[in-house]
Amino acid sequence: MAKTIVVKQIGSPIRRPEKQRQTLIGLGLNKMHKTRELEDTPSVRGMINKIPHLVEIVEERG
């Protein structure tokens, strides 16, 4: 089984640059306090590292 991480949106995309909004959408997040379970891949980690003020890693599984 692949490693997964649970990501939670903690910040609002209002008054943020368009690239940061698109990164949130790419992660599947669009509402405050929404969580998603994603595969732990370098591309997902890179997206999270681009917007650390908007998301947090809640849990790492696997």
Image (tube, helix red, strand yellow):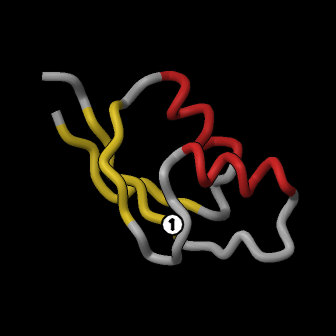
Where disc 1 sits, the SS reads strand
Q: How many marks?
A: 1
Occupied quadrant, residue 21: bottom right
**Going 66% across and 46% down the picture, which residue do you hit?**
23
Occupied quadrant, residue 53: bottom right
Nearest the viewer among 15 and 58 is: 15
Q: Position of residue 25 (x, y in %)?
A: 60, 52
Nearest the viewer among 28 and 39 is: 28
Q: Position of residue 30 (x, y in %)?
A: 55, 65
Quadrant for the N terminus, please.
top left
Q: Position of residue 11 (x, y in %)?
A: 62, 73
Give the left or right position of residue 17, taking residue 1 as reference: right
Q: Mark 1 — residue?
A: 9
**Going 16% across and 33% down the picture, which residue do you hit?**
62
**Going 37% across and 30% down the picture, which residue do you hit?**
40
Figure check: 54 above or below 45: below
Bin the neighbour count of mark 1 within 10 Å (Cα to Cα): few under 14, some 14-19, many 20 and up.
many
Occupied quadrant, residue 4: top left
Q: Residue furthest left?
A: 1
**Going 24% across and 29% down the picture, which residue do you hit?**
3
Q: Position of residue 13 (x, y in %)?
A: 72, 69
Figure check: 10 above or below 62: below
What is the three-letter code of the residue carrying label 1? Gln
Give the left or right position of residue 2, taking residue 31 as reference: left
Nearest the viewer among 16 and 30 is: 30
